[in-house]
Amino acid sequence: MAEKQRIQLIDALRGLAVLLMVVHHFLYDLVVFCGAPAWLFSNPVFNFLHYIFAGLFLFLSGVSSNFSRSNVKRGLKALACALVITAVTVVMDMPIVFGVLHLLGTCMVLYGLTRRFWEKLPFWVVPVVSIAGIVLTGHMAGGVLSESRWLWMLGWVYEGFVSTDYFPLLPWAFVFLLGTWAGKYIKAGRMPRWFYTADCPPLAAVGRHSLIIYVLHQPVLYGLTMAGLWLFGR
């Protein structure tokens, strides 16, 4: 979004979602590399919250698509960063084949190419389709086994498929699409006044730099984890 158009609350919520994802990934590093108890990363609370803040991040990205000059360029930029992450994680033997950033970039490009189609539909169609899609395909969030080796982007994975971070198009693309619908009303000024005046500068600053933070946070966390192991002789 252009600076003059920025809605600080959206930036702050995006910043909150990014920080929660960073904390979640740090807990993962502690378990995998430092031998911390597995429940620290995988437990009912975090398993639930993981999808909540990832969903919030995707929803807000859909909202922001209404303020973007080119969602296709924005998406290609995200995909380029995602491919770098894939390359690095493959070398580390912890491959991320289709994580949040891969999903986000794909959604941006697809929406950028089909935006006119969605905007021509009656106002009620997109939320109905989005919510129905989330409900009907929600079970695919973690992947569903399939004999096909070509449908993993959608949520059908083959036996042996590995992606340390995995967010398929189904159901998550519907979360993004719902955000694009909500974004039209937000941009039109139809939300309460407090929505446009509320601000939390620290979180908003994180939200404005969410892409670079998301790309760099795991190498930084990994470096800190390895430094901690060296210092404490683990």
Image (cartoon, rainbow, N blue to C red):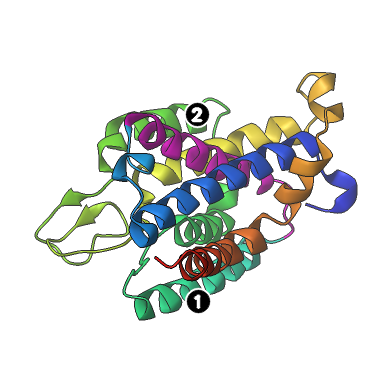
Farthest residue toward the front?
233
- The answer to whether residue 160 is left or right of residue 85 is left
Q: Residue 127: which disc?
A: 2
Residues 218 and 14: in front is: 218
Residue 218 spot, x, y in % from top left: 52, 63
Farthest residue toward the right?
4
Amino acid type shown at disc 1:
Val
Residue 158 spot, x, y in % from top left: 15, 61
Farthest residue toward the top?
192
Residue 233 spot, x, y in % from top left: 43, 68
Is the residue 162 above or below the residue 52 in the image? Answer: below
Is residue 215 found inside the magenta-colored segment of the image?
A: no
For the point 52% across and 38% down, the residue is 53
Specify the quadrant that holds the C terminus.
bottom left
- Tag 2 secondary structure: helix
Q: Is residue 120 visible?
A: no
For the point 53% across and 25% down, the residue is 124
Residue 25 spot, x, y in % from top left: 47, 52
Residues 25 and 36: in front is: 36
Characterize the magenta stretch by its predominant secondary structure: helix
Start and end of the magenta stretch?
Answer: 44-69
- Asked if disc 2 and disc 1 are in contact, CB closer than 8 Å, the reply is no
- The answer to whether residue 3 is left or right of residue 94 is right
Amino acid type shown at disc 2:
Pro
Pointer 1 residue: 84
Residues 156 and 98: in front is: 98
